[in-house]
Image (cartoon, rainbow, N blue to C red):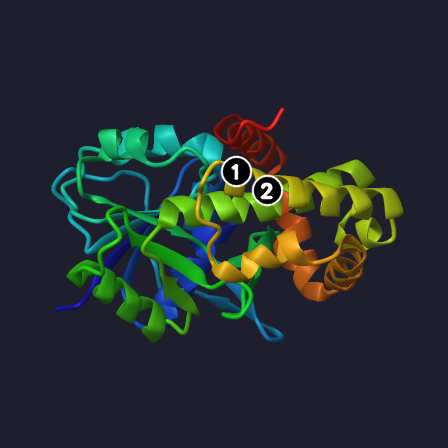
Amino acid sequence: MEKRLLIVGAGVIGSIYAVKFSEAGYNVSIFARSKRLLELKEKGLLYKKGNKILKANVHIISELLKEDKYDFVFVAVRFEQIIPALYDIKENESDSFVTMVNTAKGYEEWEGIIGTEKLIAAFPGAGGGIENGVLHYKLTPFIVQPTTFGELNGRTTKRIKELACIFSASKIPYAICNNMDDWQKSHLAMVIPMANAIYLDGGDAYSTSKNNEAMTKMCLWLKENFRALRKMKFLITPFKLNLFLICPTWLLKHSLKLLFRTKFAATVISEHANKAKQEMLLLDSEFKKVTNIT
């Protein structure tokens, strides 16, 4: 039977996964609101592929019925929107809700809203923007950060294997994680200093790469965050992120300068940081509370 997939949230991330799933032939619906809903109803989900602008084969909905069941419901909203979004869909009878949202404090509140054992924690490996109604995006390479997901209990269940098959068929790099809570804390330890350096500079990633003060502070913030995780006995995962602790500051600074001058940084790091500043500042505050950073 054909898999039915629902994307809750029609911003950049939700649109990216809707495009990729639809290209793979899945039955995809997008639950949208406000201006984006009107835009999608008028023009459809437009995206750039090479030099062409294409229209994704997706269904646009503005209401989610209780009995309208999906194999997977992907909740792709910003951190400050996740609680209202979960309340909006909590009556739906689907069994698997994939929250593609970062958090430092865990999933107890989210699971309390959506239902015990229904939640799959995940985080996207993609970034981009929407300009004049057209999505442009990049998937993050596997070696950098694949789309990562897992059960809250760490088990590789039947539905986790099914989800892996969906990502594979959609040509989306992915990784299954048995400790998503620590993975997301580790991810925040990395991305928050990068965003804060961009805010300190006041420009984009390329501009920040030439700002010596911003780059130096970013490296110091990175080391402080990962030391705090280690002190609190959280697992730094994936293991490669320990490089932020052991790498000399001068070498880390040089490497990040090179990264911030790439097109990848402009699309995946800088664009998101500047468009989601409220989200990043809230996550920064939450991370500091969890790790006791003053």
Quarter of the figure that contains the N terminus: bottom left
Residue annotated with mark 2: 227
Residue shown at 23% from the left, 29% from the top:
112
Residue shown at 31% from the left, 29% from the top:
109
| Horizontal arrangement in the rendering, residue 149 relative to residue 156 (left or right) | right
Amino acid carrying mark 2 in the image: Arg
Q: Position of residue 260 (x, y in %)?
A: 74, 58
Q: Secondary structure at mark 2?
A: helix
Amino acid carrying mark 1 in the image: Lys
Mark 1–mark 2 contact, CB under 8 Å? yes
Q: Quadrant of residue 20?
A: bottom left
Task: Say if residue 202 shows up in the picture.
Answer: no
| Horizontal arrangement in the rendering, residue 128 relative to residue 261 (left or right) | left
| Horizontal arrangement in the rendering, residue 145 relative to residue 71 (left or right) | right
Nearer to me, 1 or 158? 158
Residue annotated with mark 1: 231
